[in-house]
Amino acid sequence: MNPLERQRLRVTYARGEAIKYISHLDLARTWERTLRRARVPLSYSQGFTPRPKITFAAALPVGVTGLREVMDLILERPVMPLNFARRLSLHLPSGLEVISVEAVYYRLPSLQSQMCAVRYRVEVEWAGERGALASHVSDFLAAETIVRQRRGKTYDLRPLVKSLSVGERVQDGFVLYMHLCHSQKGTARHDEVMDALGLAMAVRSACRERLFFAQTI
């Protein structure tokens, strides 16, 4: 089929508690099955093992929920985004929710290449006062470098953390908000930040609230 007849849809969705412990690969398979059940006219790659043309902005870590995750689909023929969303909602498994669907320019840069940052909300157990927790955060932000290792390679975590703050009190603890770099030049992970704070074992839940892109998508 002529590529000009195809359509690129951008789907914003939420991943909830019910499926937060599945891997990114299993999540992709879940989406494939759901889209097939909804009879979505997906476009497939060429070759011996054709795959549906589905791309995700960023893999969501296991155990983390997501409020506004983003993926792109290439369809063999155009559909109305509203009709697409309605049809898809009938087949979504527990834990997945479609937030919005829009048609975007077919030849836009890939989602992954436009990613620049993410925002997390992390609940931590903390029996002490807010000020003591805020002191941990202040020490982190005041550090010139925070040397860490990932897969055997040393890197500086500090410049990858755009902001970090103590939020509202929750049962038995507080919320931490963090705005982290997530691009081809460097990526910070929320669990690495928590480990650097000495709070890795205190995490009760984590939610990726938003993805940020280098340009309006």
Image: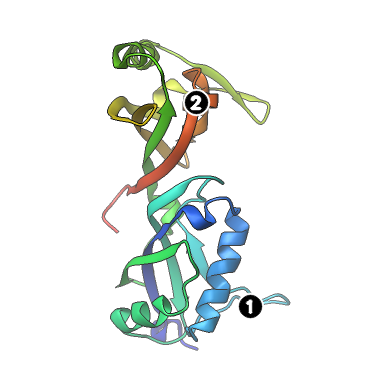
Three-letter code, disc 2: Ala
What x and y, as percent, mark residue 123? 40, 33
**Colour mode?**
rainbow
Q: Secondary structure at mark 1?
A: loop
Q: Which mark is residue 104?
A: none
What x and y, as percent, mark residue 105? 32, 71
> In the figure, 128 relative to 100: above or below?
above
Q: Secondary structure at mark 2?
A: helix
In the picture, the quarter occupied by the C terminus is bottom left
> In the figure, 103 relative to 198: above or below?
below
Q: Which residue corresponds to the image point at 40% horizontal and 24% vertical from the top-left?
A: 159
Q: CA distance from mark 1 to mark 2?
A: 47 Å
Q: Which residue corresponds to the image point at 34% horizontal and 80% vertical from the top-left?
A: 86
- According to the picture, the residue beneath numbered tag 1 turns out to be 46
Q: How many marks?
A: 2
Query: Is residue 188 something one can see in this rendering?
Result: no
Q: Residues within 10 Å of mark 1 (few under 14, many from 20)?
A: few
- According to the picture, the residue beneath numbered tag 2 turns out to be 202
Query: Is residue 130 something one can see in this rendering?
Result: yes
Q: Quadrant of residue 127?
A: top left
Decide which of 169, 52 is in the foreground and name it: 169
Q: Nearer the viewer, mark 1 or mark 2?
A: 2
In this rendering, position of residue 111 left or right of residue 22 = left
What x and y, as percent, mark residue 164? 33, 26
